[in-house]
Image (cartoon, grey):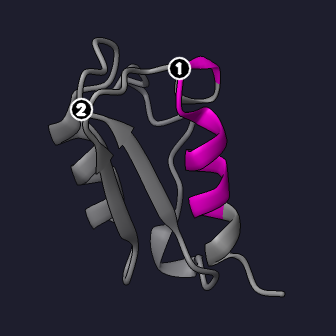
Amino acid sequence: MFDQIGATKVDTAAITCPVLCVEGADDKLVSPATARATADGYPGATFWELQGHGHMLVLEPGAEEIARRIAARLPA
């Protein structure tokens, strides 16, 4: 979104691990459409749009529950 010259370009086809993109629906910095487009660029990625959350998910009320949901997706 901010990288106009491609310095942070990622070869998404080379990513073989599971990808989870998490977006706060009330994010004022990265739009839900941009977050969705990011997730769509990774084959098989999972996208979560969290209602009632903004950009700073780890600092907002409910962060512990979000962390638990993410941790539940990790292999044991």
Residue 75 position (above or below residue 32): below
7 sits left or right of 4 in the view: right
Q: Is residue 56 rendered to the left or right of residue 4?
A: right
Q: Which residue is found at the position 60% from the left and 34% from the top?
A: 63
Q: Please, what is the dominant secondary structure of the magenta stretch? A: helix
Instruction: Determine whether the residue tagged by mark 1 lies in a helix, strand or loop.
Output: loop
Location of residue 60 (image quadrant): top right
Residue at screen point 47% across, 69% down: 12
Q: Which mark is residue 25?
A: 2
Label 2 secondary element? loop
Q: Is residue 66 magenta?
A: yes
Q: Residue furthest right?
A: 76
At label 1, which amino acid type do we have?
Met
- Residue placed at 64% from the left, 81% from the top? 17
Region in magenta: 59-70
Q: Residue furthest top?
A: 28
Relative image position of residue 18 (x, y in whole percent): 57, 79
- Image-quadrant location for residue 30: top left
Give the image location of residue 52, x and y in percent. Answer: 28, 28
Q: Name the quadrant of the C terminus.
A: bottom right
How many residues crowd mark 2 within 10 Å: few (<14), some (14–19), many (20+)? some
Above or below — where is 35 with respect to 1?
below
Earlier-in-chain disc, 1 versus 2:
2
The residue that disc 1 covers is 56
Is mark 1 in CB contact (under 8 Å) with mark 2? no
* Mark 2 residue type: Ala
Can you say which quadrant of the picture contains the N terminus? top left
